[in-house]
């Protein structure tokens, strides 16, 4: 692979991830969780050509270098349930294994 990603609609080529992350024409709009394998979850992006495409969480995993909780809080009283809602991109306050993905989302939003 010689480039980072290609838009499935307009065929725009991002040569590398830094170019992708710095592109004002790209906006993260959703997250599809894969509870069995968090890095196989999908981030959904809108491109300025009005199409939506997805990239795996694992592609951006190294953007977050902070701690990852070992336990899951999903379904507990401390879990706000954000991961169950594809369009919710808010950070998660729970001490949950899934929360680091939402930290990455916060990074991608800026
Ligand atoms: Zn496009």
Image (tube, rainbow, N blue to C red):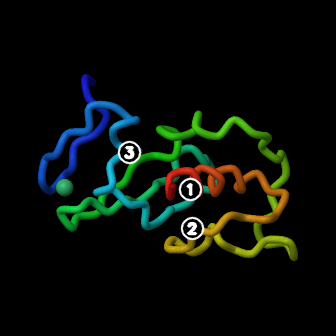
For label 2, the SS is loop
Q: Quadrant of residue 47?
A: bottom left
Residue to which mark 3 is pinned: 22
Please rate how many residues cluster around mark 2, counting C-alpha atoms within 10 Å: few if below 14, some from 14 to 19, many from 20.
some
Residues at marks 2 and 1 touching, judged by CB atoms closer than 8 Å: yes
Residue to which mark 2 is pinned: 89
Please indicate whether residue 45 sits to the left or right of residue 12 in the image. right
Label 2 or label 1, whichever comes before in sequence order? 2
Residues at marks 3 and 1 touching, judged by CB atoms closer than 8 Å: no
For label 1, the SS is helix
Write the residue at 25% across / 23% down. Answer: 2
Label 3 or label 2, whichever comes before in sequence order? 3
Please rate how many residues cluster around mark 1, counting C-alpha atoms within 10 Å: few if below 14, some from 14 to 19, many from 20.
many
Pinpoint residue 84: horizontal percent, then vertical percent: 61, 72
Outermost residue, left side: 10
Residue to which mark 1 is pinned: 105
Pinpoint residue 14: horizontal percent, then vertical percent: 26, 38
Pinpoint residue 25: horizontal percent, then vertical percent: 28, 57
Write the residue at 63% across / 67% down. Answer: 83
Pinpoint residue 28: horizontal percent, then vertical percent: 43, 60
Q: Is the CB atom of the residue marked by disc 2 within 8 angstroms of ligand 1's nearest atom?
A: no
State which quarter of the image contains the N terminus: top left
Outermost residue, top side: 2
Write the residue at 29% across / 63% down. Answer: 52
């Amino acid at each position: 692979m010689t480039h980072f990603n290609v838009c499935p609609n307009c065929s725009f080529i991002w040569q590398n991830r830094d170019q992708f992350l710095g592109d004002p024409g790209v906006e993260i709009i959703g997250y599809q969780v894969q509870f069995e394998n968090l890095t196989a979850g999908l981030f959904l992006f809108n491109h300025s050509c009005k199409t939506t495409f997805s990239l795996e969480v694992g592609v951006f995993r190294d953007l977050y270098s902070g701690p990852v909780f070992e336990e899951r809080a999903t379904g507990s009283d401390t879990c706000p349930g954000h991961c169950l809602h594809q369009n919710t991109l808010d950070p998660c306050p729970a001490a949950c294994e899934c929360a680091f993905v939402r930290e990455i989302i916060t990074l991608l939003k800026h």
